[in-house]
């Protein structure tokens, strides 16, 4: 298992570097933004560009980029949006907003999603199941910005329950802040709930029809006992890795939701960097999103092995 | 009945002089697709979804033809206006009447609306929703003031606009007025006559400096139209409003041009040749949403079909090679697809837009972005199918008979997996539409020059005015929601119908 984990991590790092290299070259191929001629930072930035090898071959540039990254954790300076400021510094500032919104969202969506899924599976082929399954299907299909619109219109405008956009400031855990991020939390939540409901229902119905459940009932367990001790444990083999993946995804956030609700988060920063052609920020965002995607996949894969003894034993052979 | 002593003549042979062999099936045999269709039809929700889908597709084809507008028609002033059709508005049914609610209209504002109604004959106030009474101290006396919440027809309440016309244009409008009998140009009002209010072209009556009407003793407006012929910029020989003794100035002289008060509703008819007819209202750039949704959906659907077709082909070939050859070929190709699938889609789209948009166009580079990573799912699916079938006996038999690799792959293995491959395509299309909408919504890809508009663009334009014009986001939202739901339900239905392992379970 340890060997398998290490192998996977090394492989992930390899993939990460290949992707970074490709994106790096593509970004550096673009003409760098013109610097304002009178700004005092301009000269420094030009010298920096020289030092970063802007006129050298791409491999040399990439080597310098990686070297700076490993020795000084230097992601470069913002050349447009936050003129002259360190990209990493800006980025870290933006991280909490994204994390707070997503954390609240998954904290309540995962339990609700799983509970609905279990309910639907236990009541299979009754109206409860049909209602939940149909709603899940409907909810999962509709994109999040449609929810955002409905929530903004109904809750924020008609009922005036919440403010339209996120409150500025850094008091992430205050009540006022929580109130102002309820709309984005809700918009993000529907999809996640539906996803977990669907997985749980599918998994649990399959487990419930398997033969060991029949055995459990025949040896005298009540239905509740059999479900909780045998069925649920087995269906969590699939659900728990999903939860881990979702937790990693907290960092990523959603570009669209952050744009609509003016959340000063990573997604909004990425979007601004794209529209404002700030390549150093864009490069950092690219690495960040790539790393999150890869890490989520990795965690899901490895946690399967930890949770399910069959997979763990299988890998030893 | 007596069963014990049955006489011998009662017995006869079951089959005498008959050959013993299997009897051919009496029922008509049913093919794979026919069977799948039968199973699909049993799934009620998928059938309904298929019908809705058909209606939506028809909408996208027909709507841009039915709408009097082109998607590139943008009106300067009818911006974020609610749905309106003249004939239905006159029935007073409460919808399609261009109604917006205006709260807290004081008595001065009510005079303003009355002014428009009296001058143009179009009463913009549809109904009074609520009346508020308040006591205000005014010059030491307690006065009762009323404010009203009213529903206003936005198209009519716009009223007059000031425009500087060239002499030729001025004459053209006059000719048109004579021909149709519709009054576009109304008598000019000098701003000095209405206490210097330059920003309110709708005031034509005597008023104080705040715009409150000063009524005569009968409670009527006192017109203050310009009637000094020396100020006329050009000759006017067309329709005159009632009450005009022939001295009112319609075209006010301005260096090289004629300044006019135009009734915008009629001016619009003059410009476009028809009355405004916005079944779903207009958006923040003055486009007809009814037409916009159709055009956007048309693009989305075609684009999604194209993307799916390309990805299906690439993915099938790639997956076939991976699955069939296995070993180091599989290893290498898997690494490549691992790397490509790790790149976030936003990054791919952005980089392709930055690099290729100038060379192959926005749509081309967007298509490349989809193709770069889109085929991976399909390849994985095909690969699994190939691993499942390639070890089976019929493949060994075919190989023994000397079939080539190509023949084995595409004649023997591929058709076995085709059911699941095709049905996954039905679920790929909504995925593509969803990503495409997100990217255009975010403005990372701008397709307005190519396609006119897209659902994503319409939604983002609508979202900029959620409170003032909810209809602008509502209709695209409904359309997109329905499209995605019905596509997914339809795709799920197809998948279940084509999947032989579920056969018999749900019967």
Image (cartoon, rainbow, N blue to C red):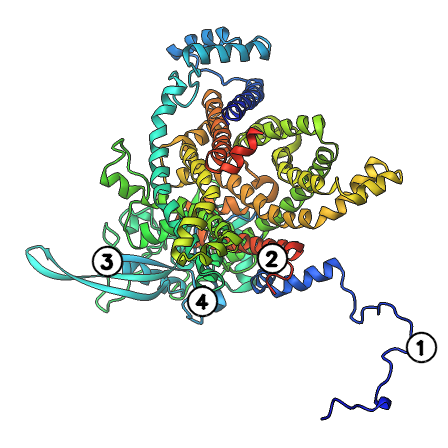
Of the residues tagged 4 and 1, which is closer to the observer? Answer: 1
- Circle 3 packing at 10 Å, graded few (<14), some (14-19), many (20+), is some
Sooner in the amino-acid sequence: mark 1 or mark 3? 1
Of the residues tagged 4 and 2, which is closer to the observer? Answer: 2
Instruction: Pick whichever, A49 or B118, lies toward us.
Output: A49
Q: CA distance from mark 1 to mark 3?
A: 106 Å
Residue A188 in the image: above or below residue B444: below
Sooner in the amino-acid sequence: mark 4 or mark 2? 4
- Circle 4 packing at 10 Å, graded few (<14), some (14-19), many (20+), is some
**Mark 1 — residue?**
B17
* Badge 2 and badge 1 both on one subunit: yes
Q: CA distance from mark 3 to mark 4?
A: 25 Å
Image position of B295 (left or right of B283): right
- Circle 1 packing at 10 Å, graded few (<14), some (14-19), many (20+), is few
**Mark 2 — residue?**
B493
Labelled disc at residue B106: 3
**Mark 4 — residue?**
B89
- Local secondary structure at mark 2: helix
Q: CA distance from mark 4 to mark 1?
A: 85 Å
Please give the chain letter of the residue carrying mark 1.
Answer: B
Looking at this view, name the residue that lies furthest to the left: B140
Instruction: Pick whichever, A244 or B97, lies toward us.
Output: A244
């Amino acid at each position: 298992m340890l060997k398998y984990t290490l192998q996977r991590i090394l492989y992930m790092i390899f993939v990460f570097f290949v992707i970074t290299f490709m994106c790096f070259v593509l970004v550096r191929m673009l003409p760098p933004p013109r610097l304002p001629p009178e700004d005092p930072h301009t000269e420094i930035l030009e010298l920096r560009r020289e030092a970063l090898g802007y006129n050298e071959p791409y491999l040399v540039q990439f080597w310098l980029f990686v070297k700076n990254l490993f020795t000084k954790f230097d992601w470069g300076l913002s050349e447009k949006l936050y003129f002259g400021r360190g990209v990493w510094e800006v980025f870290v500032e933006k991280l909490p907003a994204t994390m707070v919104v997503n954390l609240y969202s998954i904290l309540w969506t995962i339990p609700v999603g799983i509970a609905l899924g279990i309910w639907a599976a236990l009541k299979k082929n009754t109206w409860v199941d049909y209602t939940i399954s149909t709603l899940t299907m409907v909810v999962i299909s509709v994109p999040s910005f449609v929810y955002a619109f409905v929530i903004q219109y109904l809750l924020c405008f008609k009922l005036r329950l919440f403010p339209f956009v996120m409150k500025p400031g850094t008091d992430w855990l205050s009540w006022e802040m929580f109130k102002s991020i309820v709309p984005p939390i809700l918009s993000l939540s529907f999809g996640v709930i539906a996803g977990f409901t669907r997985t749980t229902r599918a998994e649990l119905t399959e487990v419930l029809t398997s033969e060991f459940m029949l055995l459990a009932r025949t040896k005298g367990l009540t239905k509740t006992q059999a479900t909780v001790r045998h069925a649920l444990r087995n269906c969590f083999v699939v659900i728990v890795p999903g939860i881990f993946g979702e937790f990693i995804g907290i960092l990523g956030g959603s570009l669209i939701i952050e744009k609509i609700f003016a959340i000063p988060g990573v997604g909004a920063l990425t979007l601004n960097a794209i529209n404002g052609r700030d390549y150093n920020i864009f490069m950092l965002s690219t690495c960040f999103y790539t790393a999150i995607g890869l890490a989520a996949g990795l965690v899901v894969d490895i946690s399967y092995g930890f949770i399910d003894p069959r997979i763990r034993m299988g890998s030893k052979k | 009945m007596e069963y014990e002593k049955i006489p011998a003549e009662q017995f006869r042979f079951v089959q005498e002089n008959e050959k013993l062999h299997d009897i051919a099936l009496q029922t008509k045999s049913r093919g794979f697709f026919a069977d799948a269709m039968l199973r699909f039809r049993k799934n009620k929700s998928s059938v309904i979804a298929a019908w809705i889908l058909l209606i939506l597709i028809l909408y996208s084809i027909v709507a841009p033809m039915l709408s009097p507008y082109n998607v590139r028609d943008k009106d300067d002033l009818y911006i974020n206006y609610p749905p309106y059709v003249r004939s239905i508005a006159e029935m007073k049914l409460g919808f399609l009447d261009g109604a917006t609610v205006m709260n807290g209209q004081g008595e001065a504002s009510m005079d303003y609306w009355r002014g428009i109604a009296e001058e143009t004959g179009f009463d913009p106030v549809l109904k009074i929703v609520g009346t508020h009474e308040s006591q205000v101290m005014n010059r030491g006396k307690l006065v009762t003031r009323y404010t009203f919440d009213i529903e206003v027809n936005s198209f009519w309440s716009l009223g007059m606009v000031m425009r500087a016309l060239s002499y030729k244009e001025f004459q053209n409008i006059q000719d048109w007025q004579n021909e149709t009998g519709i009054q576009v140009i109304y008598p000019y009002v000098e701003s000095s006559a209405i206490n210097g209010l330059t920003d309110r072209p709708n005031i034509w009556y005597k008023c104080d400096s705040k715009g409150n009407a000063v009524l005569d003793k009968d409670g009527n407006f006192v017109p203050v139209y310009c009637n000094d012929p020396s100020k006329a910029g050009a000759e006017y020989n067309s329709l005159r409003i009632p009450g005009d003794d022939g001295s009112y100035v319609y075209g006010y002289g301005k260096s090289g041009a004629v300044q006019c008060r135009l009734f915008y509703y009629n001016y619009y008819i003059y410009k476009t040749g028809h009355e405004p007819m916005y079944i779903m209202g207009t958006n923040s750039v003055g486009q007809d949403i009814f037409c916009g949704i159709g055009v956007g959906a048309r693009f989305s659907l075609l684009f999604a079909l194209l993307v799916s077709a390309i990805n299906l082909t690439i993915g099938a070939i790639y997956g076939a090679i991976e699955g069939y050859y296995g070993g180091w070929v599989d290893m290498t190709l898997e690494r490549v697809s691992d790397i490509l699938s790790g790149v976030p889609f936003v990054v791919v789209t952005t980089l392709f837009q930055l690099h290729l948009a100038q060379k192959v166009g926005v749509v081309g580079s967007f298509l490349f972005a989809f193709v770069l990573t889109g085929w991976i799912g399909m390849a994985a699916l095909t690969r699994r199918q190939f691993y499942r079938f390639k070890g089976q006996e019929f493949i060994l038999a075919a190989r023994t008979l000397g079939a080539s690799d190509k023949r084995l792959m595409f004649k023997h293995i591929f058709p076995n997996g085709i059911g699941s491959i095709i049905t996954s395509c039905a679920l790929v299309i909504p995925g593509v539409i969803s990503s495409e909408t997100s990217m255009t919504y975010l403005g990372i890809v701008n397709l307005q020059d190519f396609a006119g508009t897209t659902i994503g663009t319409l939604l983002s334009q609508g979202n900029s005015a959620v409170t003032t014009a909810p209809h602008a986001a509502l209709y695209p939202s409904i359309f997109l929601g329905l499209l995605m739901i019905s596509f997914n339900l339809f795709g799920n239905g197809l998948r279940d119908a084509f999947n032989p392992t579920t056969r018999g379970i749900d019967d």
